[in-house]
Image (cartoon, rainbow, N blue to C red):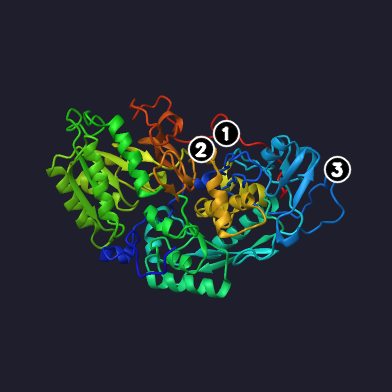
Amino acid sequence: MQPAQAGSAGGAGGSGANRQLKRWGPIAGVVAVVGIGIGVIAFSGGDDDESVTPAPTVTSAPAGSTDTTTPDEGTGEAPATTTAATDGAAPTTTAATGEWTYPLSFSDAEELGVVDQIDWGDRCDTSTGVIAVPDFFAPECYAPFTGDNGGATDQGVTADEIVVVNYLGLEGDPVIGYITDAVAVNDTNEQQGQTMLDLVEYYHAFYELYGRKVRLVNFEGTGIATDEVAARADAALIAEQYEPFAVLGGPALTSAFGDELAARGIMCIGCTPGQPTEFYAERDPLVWSLGTSSAQGQTHVVEFVTKQLVGKNAEHAGEEFRDQPRRFGYLYLDSSGAAADLAQEFADAMEAAGAPFAETVVYALDPATIQATASQAISKMKSAGVTTIVFSGDPVAPRDFTREATAQEYFPEWVVAGSTLVDTNAFSRTYDQQQWQHAFGVTFGAVRTDTNLVGSYALYKWFNGTEPPAPGRLPVMAPNPALFFAVLQGVGPNLTHETWRDALFAGTGTRQAISQPFLSWGDKEYWPYTDYHGVDDATIFWWDAEATGPDELREEGQGMWQYVDGGTRYLPGQWPTEERLFDPEGAEDFYTVPPPGEEPPSYPSPAG
């Protein structure tokens, strides 16, 4: 870990950051994990050796711990009293068929032959071995804990509680408001804070926390999303006033907050916009991301372009280009001091793939100048004979770029290169539809399923019996606690930042599915480096300007993203060569029922 510093090369505060960016900021960090919040994530198993920390399980709704007991040694009966382990170590229980230590997942208990000798409690469905909640992605049950959990194992941890701070952005932040106004997200900080408290209670009801409960503190930031000085001051105040074990969330558009927390020995999840791998490695085990990195995103886009677009005509563009060989252009947001270097790496990879950029235009997100910028950018692309614009930017600017392209009677293909929120129906409906009917590309989000049936919204209503106070922000808020609590189960009683990381890295990854991304961390075969980001796979989609249905805020309207082959997802090296763009056969825009094989089980609601 490195000490706090004024700015990092990869952060929004880098010395090369654009002046207008300082004022308005990039949008990529606002909802970097929007696709994750739709489902609950469950890690699959790790090492079979019982002495190794079992792989954790993750959800995008909440979970917690209950004070239940383990069976007496060799009898399978619950003891009348509990006995603390010596030296603060996690207790070891010797069952009739073997020996085990906490944490113990249901699958590990099956391998050891001790499942029937453990009282799993009402929170566990012992017919399946997963917690009894109506979600296909629900995690495994973990053996209820008894004994000495070691007490104060790390900062913010006692025998009874874990202190966690939930960061809320400044109420009325004009930067965030400029973005969310386009899709009418108006949940207040009070509503968001209450929703997070409710999520924690869900976790307390169903997850094993080894005798502890989370004490959640809602904290409102003092500066706008791009304010580095305020971000560092807020991090210092949190560290000194609350001394937490972890912080969930942070300012969306500066890395200063996460940097300062790490320098003070505090772990945070989703506390910074996406950074280069080196940023996380230098702060290991304290800063974590659920989204995908820029480098990982480029890997997917280049493979898609190489296998499906290179060497073919621009058949999905306007009539003037359909019989012409594709000629690529690159339009990207200057989002940080590292943006230019990342863009050059992408350009080099595209050229190596046989798709060099004939024109590259960089822009800054500034409402005062974006219209003039759009005019110049489109003129350059048109003059260069670009048939196919690869777009990597924010979800607001495409309104101006597409309107300007139509005004100049220029109708290229628009390739969405994993741009955050551009891949949502809510934002895409605000773009010029004459242009956007030529849009397709790569998304790290998943094809959506009715939120009344699956995901964080459905689980919240099932558990509480009411709609969440912050329904618009819930899918964005839910992934951070989902990851945190899931890993807590896999850590066991000895909770430290290092054991939390080790439990996360021990997992082989989440369950692969259609309705949510695949996530993993650590050393995996598909990345040539230690992975500190979550989402690893992606899928292909195209814009259908005529289709109707609900957007991400459950608002009915016209215009829907269609997911190729029902939303089938691909890891690096798995992308198909057959192009199915704008082919309605097999495409899905919205699952009114869960995809086949991903149906949730049914359980009575705790709220009646």
Mark 3 vs mark 2: in front: 3
- Residue 209 visible at all: yes
Asked whether 494 or 211 is in front, the reply is: 494
Query: In this image, 467 relative to 264: left or right?
Result: right
Image quadrant in which you'd find residue 329: top left
Type of residue at label 2? Ser
Q: Earlier in the sequence, mark 2 or mark 1?
A: 2
- Residue 181 visible at all: no
Query: How many numbered marks appear?
Result: 3
- Residue 75 is marked as 3
Secondary structure beneath label 3 = loop
Q: Which residue lies under the disc numbered 2?
A: 515
Q: Earlier in the sequence, mark 3 or mark 1?
A: 3
Type of residue at label 1? Glu
Secondary structure beneath label 1 = loop
Query: In this image, 169 relative to 596: left or right?
Result: left
Whole-angstrom CA distance, mark 3 to mark 2, is: 43 Å
- 356 lies above or below 276: above
- The answer to whether marks 2 and 1 mark residues whose Cβ atoms lie closer than 8 Å is yes
Measured from the top left, where is residue 285 in percent x and y? 50, 57
Q: Earlier in the sequence, mark 3 or mark 2?
A: 3
Whole-angstrom CA distance, mark 3 to mark 1, is: 38 Å
